[in-house]
């Protein structure tokens, strides 16, 4: 498949992505995912404005997370089978419309519905990430993914700051109007600047969704990383859902503008994203994951002191925010790097599985934090976060004791682009004698694939066996 940006063929031969392209993708990713976080520092303000309890107001975040998780399951896989520039542009435009609906919502139920739709369209961020990985050359993939993911984290953190400032000097509805304008501008810019990004496979939609389940069933590495992703995002959401109530409460008494500024402390995670990507390019992804889990667990011990208030509590909160965000982002980059390398031809579907797990964990964590804070306060929330982090430690200990395979899966199956998801197809290929089954999976570089002519589709022992003038593709199970 040709690289739509460089025009090169094999992934390893692609020219590096331009810095401008990577930055544009990072901005799109961050701005899109920011839409589901604008409401977090506004929860006390929204609750008072609509005359509802803090617990009911906190469910605004839960509603957006539910929409986001559903979209991850149902829309993100389309990134493997549709032209991705058009798909991303359309979703950004729809997001702008939904944000305007949230700004005009007359009641809490209407706001729930609008932010749920915003969550659905904001999953475009998780189409951009595997798209960036596909466009990148092999030697820079971890760094490119890390940069795009740093954009995602900066978007999340700056969403809180921008929302707080706009709400302080305007109204909470103005925040959603601002977000709608950003989405419209990016939709137009991306459509004009980025070249078409062709799909990697032509697969019917029902089969595409089933293949995600096949990946989850057959790949133990994916299942474990999904568990860790749920833990990391759960901790992240617990912190940011409950911290707004802590900072607006008696211990601190801050307004929305000051509360939003605390998002800047989390931007340190953007540095972790780029660094983690570079470490992953050097084969140190497991060390990144181990360090991330240790830091994630320790951060809750620091955050527990934030409930005391005063200068000491404030310092503990800032340090804890920085540590937790750094840990969560490093973990996510580690997951994506190893999984994109494991199944290179199904990156959108791997992203679907990973992010559905992430935001399922986030949705549950958001609901638990909203329920626990009124009953048990900040101490109860920190206990919830610590238990969640320890679940991740247990999953990782299992991975260290019984490692999952992480080498690239060989190309299996038939179609415009080979797909590695159905393991049973390997056995079928063996029985047909096509040479693309498990035997060829274990011996990389064992033949040439004739791509046109009378012997099209055949695996040959040398180039000379194929018709003269035909194109040849050296098969390599580790490409």
Image (cartoon, helix red, strand yellow):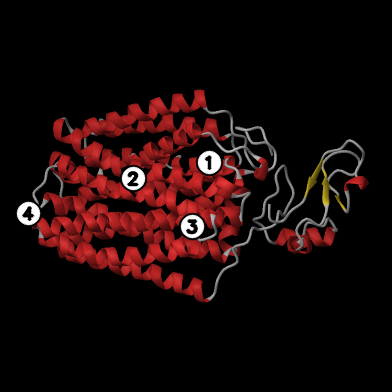
Q: Pointer 4: what residue? A: 250
Is the residue marked by circle 2 packed among few (<14), some (14-19), or many (20+) residues within 10 Å?
many
For the question of whether residue 271 can be seen, the reply is yes
Q: Pointer 3: what residue? A: 335
Q: Which of pointers 2 and 1 lies earlier in the amino acid sequence?
A: 2
Q: Quadrant of residue 290?
A: bottom left
Q: Which of pointers 3 and 1 lies earlier in the amino acid sequence?
A: 1
CA separation in Å, label 2 and label 3: 24 Å
Is the residue marked by circle 1 packed among few (<14), some (14-19), or many (20+) residues within 10 Å?
many
Look at the picture and state if 38 lies above or below 235. Answer: above
Q: Helix, strand, or loop for circle 1?
A: helix
Left/right placement of residue 231 relative to residue 338 reads left
Q: Which of pointers 2 and 3 lies earlier in the amino acid sequence?
A: 2
Q: Between residues 104 and 392, which one lies in front from this camera angle?
A: 392
Tell me the residue at 34%/41% (across/down).
Answer: 155
CA separation in Å, label 3 and label 1: 16 Å
Tell me the residue at 55%/60% (across/down).
Answer: 216
Is the residue marked by circle 3 packed among few (<14), some (14-19), or many (20+) residues within 10 Å?
many
Q: Between residues 476 and 220, which one lies in front from this camera angle?
A: 476
Q: Which of pointers 4 and 2 lies earlier in the amino acid sequence?
A: 2
Is label 4 in contact with label 1 (beta carbons under 8 Å)? no
**Which image quadrant: the N terminus?**
top right
Q: Pointer 1: what residue? A: 132
Q: Position of residue 398 (x, y in %)?
A: 48, 74
Q: Helix, strand, or loop for circle 3?
A: helix
Q: Helix, strand, or loop for circle 2?
A: helix
Q: Pointer 2: what residue? A: 64
Q: Which of pointers 4 and 1 lies earlier in the amino acid sequence?
A: 1
């Amino acid at each position: 498949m040709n690289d739509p940006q460089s025009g090169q063929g094999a992934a390893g031969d692609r020219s590096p992505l331009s810095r401008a392209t990577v930055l544009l993708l990072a901005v799109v990713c961050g701005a899109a995912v920011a839409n589901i976080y604008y409401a977090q520092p506004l929860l006390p303000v929204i609750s008072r404005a609509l005359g509802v309890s803090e617990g009911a107001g906190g469910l605004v975040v839960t509603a957006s997370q539910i929409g986001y998780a559903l979209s991850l399951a149902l829309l993100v896989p389309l990134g493997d089978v549709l032209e991705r520039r058009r798909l991303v542009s359309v979703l950004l435009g729809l997001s702008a419309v939904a944000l305007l609906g949230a700004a005009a919502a007359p009641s809490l139920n209407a706001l729930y519905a609008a932010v749920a739709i915003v969550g659905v369209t904001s999953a475009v961020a998780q189409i951009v990430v595997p798209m960036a990985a596909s466009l990148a050359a092999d030697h820079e993939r971890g760094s490119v993914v890390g940069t795009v993911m740093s954009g995602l984290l900066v978007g999340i953190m700056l969403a809180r700051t921008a929302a707080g400032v706009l709400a302080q000097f305007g109204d909470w509805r103005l925040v959603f109007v601002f977000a709608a304008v950003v989405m419209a501008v990016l939709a137009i810019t991306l459509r004009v600047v980025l070249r078409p990004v062709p799909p990697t496979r032509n697969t019917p939609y029902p089969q595409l969704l089933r293949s995600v389940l096949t990946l989850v069933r057959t790949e133990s590495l994916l299942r474990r990383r999904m568990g860790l992703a749920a833990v990391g995002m759960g901790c992240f959401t617990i912190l940011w859902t409950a911290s707004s109530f802590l900072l607006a409460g008696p211990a601190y008494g801050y307004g929305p503008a000051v509360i939003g500024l605390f998002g800047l402390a989390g931007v340190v995670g953007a540095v972790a994203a780029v660094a983690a990507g570079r470490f992953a390019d050097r084969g140190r992804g497991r060390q990144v994951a181990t360090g991330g889990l240790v830091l994630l667990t320790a951060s809750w011990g620091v955050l527990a002191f934030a409930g005391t208030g005063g200068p000491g509590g404030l310092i503990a909160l800032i340090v804890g925010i920085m540590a937790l965000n750094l840990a969560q982002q490093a973990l996510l980059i580690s997951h994506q790097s190893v999984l994109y390398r494991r199944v290179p031809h199904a990156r959108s579907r791997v992203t679907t599985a990973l992010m559905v797990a992430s935001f399922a964990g986030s949705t549950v964590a958001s609901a638990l934090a909203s329920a626990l804070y009124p009953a048990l306060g900040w101490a109860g929330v920190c206990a919830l976060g610590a238990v969640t982090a320890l679940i991740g430690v247990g999953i990782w200990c299992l991975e260290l004791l019984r490692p999952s395979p992480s080498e690239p899966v060989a190309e299996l199956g038939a179609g415009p682009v080979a797909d590695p998801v159905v393991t049973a197809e390997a056995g079928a290929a063996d029985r047909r004698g096509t040479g693309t089954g498990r035997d060829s999976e274990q011996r990389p570089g064992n033949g040439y694939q004739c791509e046109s002519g009378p012997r099209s589709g055949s695996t040959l022992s040398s180039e000379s066996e194929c018709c003269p003038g035909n194109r040849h593709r050296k098969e390599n199970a580790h490409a």
